[in-house]
Image (cartoon, rainbow, N blue to C red):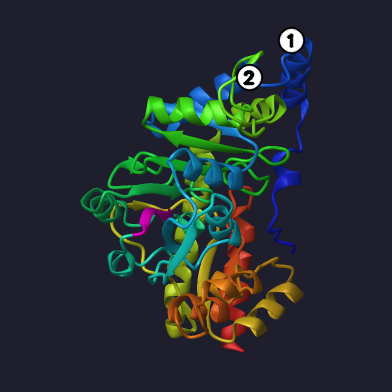
Amino acid sequence: MNVPFSYLQRQFSELDGYLADLRELVSSGSLTLGHAVSEFERGFAALHGVPHAIGVGSGTDALVVALHALGLQPGDEVITCTNTFVATVGAIVHAGGKPVLVDSENGYVIDVDQVEAAVTSRTRAILAVHYTGNVADMPRLRAIADRRGLALVEDACQATLGGINGRSVGSWGDATAFSLHPLKNLNVWGDGGLILTPSADLAARIRLYCNHGLIDRDTCAEFGINSRLDAVQAVIGSRLMRDLPAMSARQIANAARYDAAFGELGDCVDVPVRRPGVRHVYHLYIVRAKRRDALLAHLERSGVRAKIHYPRPVHLQPAARGLGYREGQFPMAEEHGRVAITLPAHPYLTDDEVSYTIEQVRQFYRS
């Protein structure tokens, strides 16, 4: 059996509806901004219970623009987690800030106990990453940000429709970045991103900056950038958004089957702690596994397309040498790089494919 990690061929096996929507868009002639983008932004904002959504060119752009719009100045410190995709830290650098890294906890998200200790007089913001689709402890982070007078930004690029204590991601931060990359929970046919914010003033600032700083066709209020969500991608996103709640529920159910099965394997497979009140949407289903590399090879031979995310934490990347961190400084993230494995859990798997994946993991440890 072949258990695919990528689901795009299955997801887009029937194209008629998408093509019909795209023909309508082309007929309108509104290929930059326009009704399709506005409609998608409104729908996405409503889905998360946040008043303002702004489409941008990518999830990385969403992070950079959010930090810029919040007033980040050269040398301002932004606290974030080393256990993340490199774009999180790269965005801080490109926005002019200085990344200050802390370790993760057992669910792969930022260790809040380390955050307050990292705050200095130069700290401007906390950037919380909802890594794997898990949700950071936003009530505690919001409290720290308010007490210290800091901006709070959510990196929800892997956590569309995630939540904590009944509140969606995107409703805790001053601004929240989302990615629409083809393999994200809500995806499009290329790059794309969104920023959510509860602030009308911040939303207006972001819209201005992302459209060259233009008030109108002939008046430039500031020298901005060009980071606009393509109308084509907005059309695709709007169609996929209709099915997103059901698809998320399916992915969560697949992860629950894995959790139950792997709990029977003792310390061979360590399923991370699932915190009460968290709606984990499992963009990535990651566990710690003994003999991880041998397990990966076994799964590959068996047709299960597992992956490793990410073998080298950000603080050990060549690009981070100037930040001054060293090996051994963040033991949880470094352990994750050595032993974590990602299994297919996407909503387009069949029940038989999930069962087969479970059996192959069991077979490896039995042997």
Judge from the rendering whether residue 215 lies leftward or rightward of residue 245; answer left or right: right
In the rendered image, the vertical position of residue 67 relative to residue 206, given as above or below: below
Please provide percent x and percent y for residue 180.
61, 41
Q: Which amino acid does label 2 sit on?
A: Ala
Vertical order, 213 against 1 (above or below): above
Question: In the picture provided, is 273 more to the left or to the right than 17?
Answer: left
Is the magenta region chiefly helix, strand or loop? strand
- Residue drawn at x 57%, y 85% as measured from the top left: 365
- Asked if residue 127 is among those painted magenta in the image, a careful observer would answer yes
Observer able to see residue 313: no
Which residue in the structure is indicated by mark 2? 36
Magenta residues, start to end: 122-128
**Residue 223, visible in the rendered structure:** yes
- Name the residue rendered at 56%, 57% in the picture: 93
Seen as rendered, the residue at the extreme top is 28
Which residue in the structure is indicated by mark 1? 28
Q: In this view, does 73 lie above or below 355?
A: above
Does dot 2 land on a helix, a strand or a loop? Answer: helix
